Amino acid sequence: MGQVTLSATPKGNGFQATVTYPNGVSISSSEAFPTQAEAIEAAALKVLDMPERLTDLDRPDIAE
């Protein structure tokens, strides 16, 4: 089963949003957000902006 992880890590005076896909690809925001919640929300929006990555999770020819 594929798992997409949304996370927030400290960066400067705030938090950086990161999306991690099952194949090991991670996408991080270039900006910092004031709170962890805002960083997680930004990560979720990144996932919604790239629906083809979610569609790829169901493809049998894509190795996890």
Image (cartoon, rainbow, N blue to C red):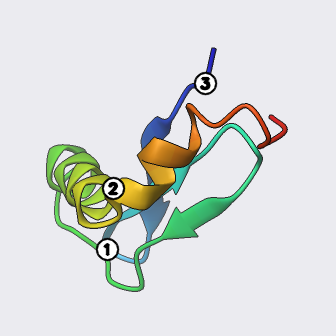
User: Dot 3: what SS?
Assistant: loop
Q: Residue 51, which numbered label?
A: 2
Residue under the image location 17 percent in, 44 percent down = 37
Which quadrant of the view contains residue 54?
Answer: top left
Q: Residue 48, which numbered label?
A: none
Q: CA distance from mark 2 to mark 3?
A: 14 Å
Q: CA distance from mark 1 to mark 2?
A: 31 Å
Q: Is residue 46 above or below residue 32?
A: above
Circles 1 and 2 in contact, beta carbons < 8 Å: no
The residue pinned by badge 3 equals 2
In this view, the residue in front, 55 or 14, is 55
Q: Amino acid at mark 3?
A: Gly
In this view, the residue in front, 54 or 33, is 54
Q: Amino acid at mark 1?
A: Asn
Q: Position of residue 34 (x, y in %)?
A: 17, 65
Local crowd size for mark 1, using a 10 Å CA cut-off: few (<14), some (14–19), many (≥20): few
The residue pinned by badge 1 equals 13
Which is closer to the viewer, label 1 or label 2?
2
How many numbered discs, if any? 3
Residue under the image location 35 percent in, 64 percent down = 50
